[in-house]
């Protein structure tokens, strides 16, 4: 009787058991601006081979219904701000900052200014009050007294343990037991005399700033107790420019602040995300595909760990199992050639696997690229988690993948002496006004190009196969030129509804003594798959 009663309660208990832990109802932090990018010195060889430090101001507000806890370290109840700089160039969006160099800002006091997110700033209360705004200037965000490592923070729950932290240990580190006593050993006196101006700040190579492209400065708020469904307004980005005047760097802001992942700024990319239920956070994936010609496509993926604490250990991309994959590439921002992710073919998947010392941790973007002869279709990539913890072992994200058929597939050989040869002039992509079929035939011979909605194999004569299913439709009637060449145009309009259309094609040459009926020779058969460019 008791067992039966317990089983009836399981469906009611399940939502509570699966809920994100530590959520404070009504808590919501929102990043509203990045501004004032500022240069804070350089290190290394003479320009342009050194490394510089920068910082930027940011604003956040409280659009929730409860105050945001805001007490200075060593109290763990305060927001933290992660920074990143990325660049779009050469068809890729890539991170320039290194997570081990660029530390996270720990907030220490809320100003409670007039709201930048609507409503009237609440007059009383502690922390960042409802509908109030707080701004941290570039100088405070560059102050090493408030900067600590990202790996001490759980971005999903917003928790940070001060015991044994960088602030607790100090820099240089103090001896036990002071390094784990919960008393701050990192002092403004020690950080104020750091001789390296770049240390712990946003660090950028000068060479990276000179590469043509677009630069973006990104910020991400971590608020303890915030529901994961509300995390998306915690991050944002702003395009910036960088210039060297002979002695110092300066930065400009050509465009306004944009909320959300910087991957959305990647021109021509498809962006999507997935998360590990209510147990852990999100990964964001962006993919940009480029038709290279000659039947090949280039795939460029950018994978961002937005707020997943367990990190990513593999990226699994479904790929047509028979297609060759070439020009494999991987990039991360740490400049270590020995810890790159290794690519391998495993059945119908292309798998990029991290070494043990280089998982995709939060506030990082890694890049993966390759070429193949299969155009993109809708499908799922899978990110396997790097560390044990609550939730599933992997996160599935819907995106675009090369899991379908090749853009142009051979159906079989032709017949004749010689047989005419059918090919495509370019790829069947949307749009492609110049798409056409080419036929190599006998000079001045009549040539007819036929199409069908499906492929079939019908033997018409010994060694001669018709590869078109009924009904067969005449596409073009032509006469080969003096070089024996035929061009049969088939413009593909800018109509997304055509994506996925598969058609079979074959050409017939009228020639005396041909193997079919004594006057016809058949070309090879091909099948085309219409894809988005």
Image (cartoon, rainbow, N blue to C red):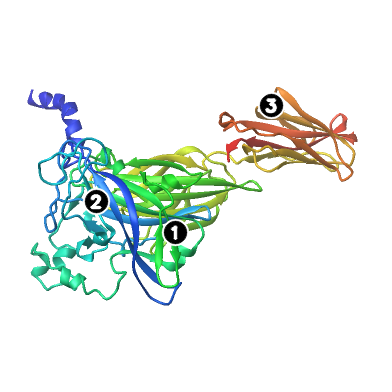
Dividing the picture into quadrants, the one containing residue 464 is top right
* Residue under the image location 89 percent in, 44 percent down: 482
Q: Residue 415's mark?
A: none
Dividing the picture into quadrants, the one containing residue 419 is top right
Q: Does residue 359 show up?
A: no
The residue beneath circle 1 is: 331
- Seen in the picture, residue 399 relative to 85 is either above or below; the reply is above
Q: Residue 135's mark?
A: 2
- Seen in the picture, residue 75 relative to 5 is either above or below; the reply is below
Query: Disc 1 on helix, strand or loop?
Result: strand
Query: Is residue 48 or residue 397 the one in the foreground?
Result: 48
Query: Disc 3 on helix, strand or loop?
Result: loop
Query: Disc 2 on helix, strand or loop?
Result: strand
CB of mark 3 within 8 Å of CB of mark 1? no
Q: Residues within 10 Å of mark 1 (few under 14, many from 20)?
A: some
* Residue under the image location 79 percent in, 40 percent down: 439
Q: Position of residue 91 (x, y in %)?
A: 52, 52
* Residue under the image location 74 percent in, 34 percent down: 506
Q: Residue 469's mark?
A: 3
Q: Position of residue 172 (x, y in %)?
A: 19, 73
Q: Position of residue 372 (x, y in %)?
A: 57, 49
Q: Earlier in the sequence, mark 3 or mark 1?
A: 1
Query: Is residue 523 or residue 287 the one in the foreground?
Result: 287
The residues bearing labels 3 and 1 have C-alpha atoms spaced at a distance of 46 Å
Q: Residues within 10 Å of mark 3 (few under 14, many from 20)?
A: some
Query: Is residue 238 or residue 346 the one in the foreground?
Result: 238
């Amino acid at each position: 009787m008791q067992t039966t009663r317990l089983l009836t309660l399981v469906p009611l208990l399940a939502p509570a058991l699966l809920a994100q832990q530590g959520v404070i109802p009504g808590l919501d932090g929102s990043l509203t601006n990045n501004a004032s990018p500022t240069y804070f010195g350089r290190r290394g060889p003479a320009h342009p081979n050194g490394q510089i430090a920068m910082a930027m101001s940011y604003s956040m507000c409280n659009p929730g219904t409860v105050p945001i806890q805001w007490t200075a370290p060593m109290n763990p109840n305060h927001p933290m701000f992660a920074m990143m700089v990325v660049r779009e160039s050469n068809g890729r969006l890539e991170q320039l900052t290194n997570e081990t160099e660029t530390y996270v800002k720990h907030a220490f006091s809320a100003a409670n200014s007039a709201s930048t997110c609507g409503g009237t700033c609440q007059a009383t209360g502690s922390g960042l009050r409802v509908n109030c705004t707080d701004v941290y200037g570039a100088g405070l965000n560059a102050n090493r007294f408030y900067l600590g490592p990202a790996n001490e923070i759980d971005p999903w729950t917003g928790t940070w343990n001060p015991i044994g932290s960088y602030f607790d240990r100090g820099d240089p580190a103090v001896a036990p037991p002071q390094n784990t006593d919960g008393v701050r050993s990192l002092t403004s006196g020690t950080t104020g005399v750091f001789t390296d101006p770049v240390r712990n700040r946003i660090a950028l190579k000068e060479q990276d700033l000179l590469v043509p492209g677009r630069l973006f400065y990104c910020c991400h708020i971590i608020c303890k107790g915030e529901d994961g469904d509300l995390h998306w307004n915690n991050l944002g980005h702003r395009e910036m420019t960088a210039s060297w005047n002979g002695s110092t760097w300066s930065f400009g802001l050509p465009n306004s602040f944009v909320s959300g992942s910087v991957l959305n700024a990647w021109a021509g990319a498809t962006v999507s995300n997935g998360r590990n239920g209510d147990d852990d956070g999100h990964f964001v994936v962006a993919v940009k595909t480029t038709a290279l010609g000659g039947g090949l496509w280039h795939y460029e993926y950018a994978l961002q760990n937005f707020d997943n604490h367990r990190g990513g250990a593999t990226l699994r991309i479904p790929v047509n199992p028979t297609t060759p994959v070439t020009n494999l590439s991987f990039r991360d921002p740490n400049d270590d050639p020995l810890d790159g992710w290794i690519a391998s073919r495993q059945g119908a998947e292309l798998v990029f696997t991290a070494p043990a010392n280089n998982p995709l941790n939060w506030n990082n973007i890694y890049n993966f690229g390759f070429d193949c002869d299969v155009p993109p279709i809708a499908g799922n990539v899978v990110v396997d988690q790097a560390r044990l913890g609550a939730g599933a072992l992997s996160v599935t994200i819907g995106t675009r993948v090369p899991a379908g058929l090749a853009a142009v597939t051979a159906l079989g050989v032709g017949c004749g002496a010689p047989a005419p040869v059918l090919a495509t002039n370019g790829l069947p992509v949307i749009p492609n006004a110049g798409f056409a079929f080419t036929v190599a035939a006998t000079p001045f011979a009549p040539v007819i190009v036929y199409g069908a909605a499906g492929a079939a194999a019908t033997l018409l004569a010994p060694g001669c196969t018709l590869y078109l299913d009924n009904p067969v439709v005449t596409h073009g009637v032509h006469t080969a030129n003096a070089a024996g060449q035929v061009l049969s145009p088939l413009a593909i309009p800018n109509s997304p509804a055509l994506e996925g259309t598969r058609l079979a094609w074959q050409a017939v040459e009228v020639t005396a003594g041909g193997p079919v009926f004594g006057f016809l020779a058949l070309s090879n058969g091909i099948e085309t798959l219409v894809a988005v460019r």
